[in-house]
Image (cartoon, rainbow, N blue to C red):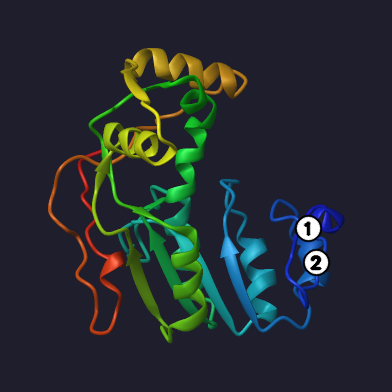
Amino acid sequence: MRDPGAAALPGGAEAVRGNLGDPDSLVAAVRGVERVYLMWPGLPVDPRVLEVITEQARQVVYLSTDVADLADDEEPTWSHQAIERQLRHSGVTWTFLRAIDFAANALRWANQVRRGTVRYPYGQAARSLVHERDIAEVADRRRHDGVAHLLTGPAALTHVEQVRIIGEVIGREVRWEEMSAEVAQEEFAAARGGRRSSWRAGCGPGSPSWTPRSGSPTRWSGCSAAPR
């Protein structure tokens, strides 16, 4: 991590300095490390970063998302695909955790929830949220070498439903106010310093895309996906 002094880690864990945007900074950080849990922060993919990691580690568990496997001659359309492919060919043992959406992402609405109204686009977009602790449990306890797991919550919930449930839990009404996609893009671009993106929120109605393997908790089933 960039600032080991700011780490809030459990006892027995050692914080070391490293930056995924600077491959040279990782050399000392991963020295002697056998297993790596890798979460990519949205930076451009630098193949050297993965080379440094896989030169030391014997196993990499990568937090990916719901992407298609690529053939060697296919051009990646998402950074996750490029990272997955490089790990497949790295010679290390790998596992991909393809999580659909994190439960903690609802925290983006926290300030609006306090005011009683959430303004956001795509109110009927449905996502199957998975709790981050469930992802950690899969990463830590399952034997899954060379496997890509699609991880979801128990059901797909629209943004409107999520806001309603949050209101029920905190004991007061929270309203949904639909924001147009155009206005959302302008506001998001302004918040990102003028950088626009092709972001679209969530999935639409569909059928479950993954059936749990034998012995897998059913809470990881039931993603609904729609065209992007």
Vertical order, 177 against 34 (above or below) = above
Q: Which residue is labeled 2 in the image?
A: 15
Residue 7 is labelled as 1
| Residue 209 percent coordinates (x, y) | 19, 60
What is the tally of numbered marks visible in this picture?
2
Q: Nearer the viewer, residue 103 or 167?
A: 167
| Dot 1 or dot 2, earlier in sequence | 1
In this image, 197 relative to 42: left or right? left
Please identify the residue farthest to the left as the structure is shown: 207
Q: Which of the two marks, 1 or 2, is nearer to us in this view?
A: 1
Mark 1: few, some, or many residues within 10 Å (few <14, many ≥20)? Answer: few
Q: Is residue 43 above or below residue 87?
A: above
Horizontal side of 199 relative to 22 (left or right) equals left
Q: Are marks 1 and 2 in contact (CB under 8 Å)?
A: yes
Q: Amino acid at mark 1?
A: Ala
Q: Of the residues shown, which amino acid type is indicated by label 2?
A: Ala
In the depicted view, which residue is nearer to us: 60 or 89? 60
Location of residue 41 in the rendering, given as x and y in whole percent from the top left corner: 59, 49
